[in-house]
Image: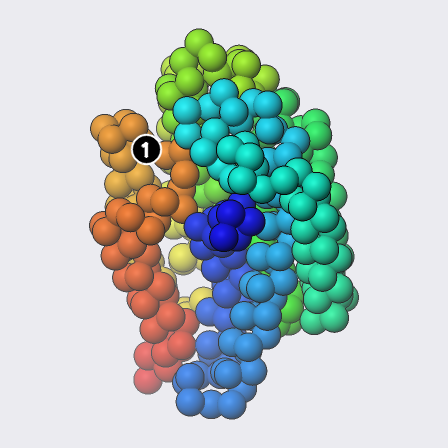
Amino acid sequence: MALFKALRPKQWTKNVLLYTGVLFTLNKTWFLLQPSMWHVLSRATLAMLVFTALASGIYLLNDVRDLPHDRLHPKKKSRPIAAGHVPVGLALVTTVILEAVGLWGAFSLAPSFGWVGLAYVLMQLAYTYWLKHLVIIDVFVLASGFVLRAVSGVLVLSAYISPWLYIVTFLGSLFLGLCKRRHELSLLAEDAGRHRQSLSHYSLELLDQMISIVTASTIMAYSLYTFSAHGLPSNHLMMLTIPYVLYGMLRYLYLVHMHKLGGSPEEILLRDRPILVVLLLWATTATAILAYGRTLSTS
């Protein structure tokens, strides 16, 4: 159980991004009752499991690498490896197994997916041993991990997604990463630099300015995507989802500033009911528009 907890199952919610490609095949598959739709869903699910293995192995390696620093952190000291519940040797062996199985599965599903999975592993290794200490670059790498998830979901299904959506994914992930850094800096105060070297180069004022820029950029990019991206219904119905994105980001900022959250986006997703509801509303509306929007525009 301790080893399972060390795999950070709550963070597996990030891998839902691999279902992005499913949304953009709805105009071809139409209903869940069609066999082709179940084929799409099964491949997306296998891809999600593969990426979960790759990410979980990296989590273990990262916890081993950060062991001395995590023991000084008020929350991370309770992680299984930092608390001594999982031996370092077992964590490293599990990492090797998960990465080997994950890469084999990725290349088996689609060679292009395999290369993206390998790029993700190499990027995360660089992050674990070097890039996490570089100011601004650290959050760029975190955001890039989300983009690679979205790309993987597209490649494994041979789907098409507008480049606008990749930009939105990157900006939205950058928003989460900056809020995470703000929470860490606020929580650790003068000890922040000892826990993570890059935190010594941030300040709350600087992070607030960065978050403001990225928030506005994300909303603008998503808005442009909804009415200008190729492949969406010509009646611009996708614009109906803009309020969901706007509310979700404002709600998240409210939680960061008023409730001192933001250090764990996956926990906010699982525990904050308004965030969960708006995500479900976005998914439902986007699914309906992508599946039936073209019919409405031509009827």
Q: Which quadrant is home to the C terminus?
A: bottom left
Whether residue 272 sits left or right of residue 20 in the image: it is: left
Q: Quadrant of residue 106?
A: bottom right
User: Residue at (50%, 20%) from the top-left corner?
Assistant: 72
Total of numbered circles in the picture?
1
In the rendered image, residue 283, in percent from the top left (x then y), is placed at: 35, 63
In the rendered image, residue 254, in percent from the top left (x then y), is placed at: 25, 34
Whether residue 40 sits left or right of residue 244 in the image: it is: right
In the rendered image, residue 279, in percent from the top left (x then y), is placed at: 32, 56
Answer few, some or many: residues within 10 Å of disc 1's Cα (few below 14, many 20 plus, some between 14 and 19). Answer: many
User: Residue at (51%, 90%) from the top-left corner?
Assistant: 35
User: Residue at (68%, 55%) from the top-left corner?
Assistant: 98
Secondary structure of the residue carrying numbered label 1: loop
- Report the front residue among 234 and 140: 140
Q: Is residue 132 visible?
A: yes
In the rendered image, residue 93, in percent from the top left (x then y), is placed at: 72, 48
Q: Which residue is mark 1?
A: 261
User: Residue at (72%, 35%) from the top-left corner?
Assistant: 126
Q: Quadrant of residue 109?
A: bottom right
Above or below, 30 relative to 165: below
Q: Amino acid at mark 1?
A: Leu
Whether residue 294 sits left or right of residue 118 in the image: it is: left
Above or below, 25 relative to 50: below
Q: Is residue 14 visible?
A: no
Above or below, 81 relative to 204: below
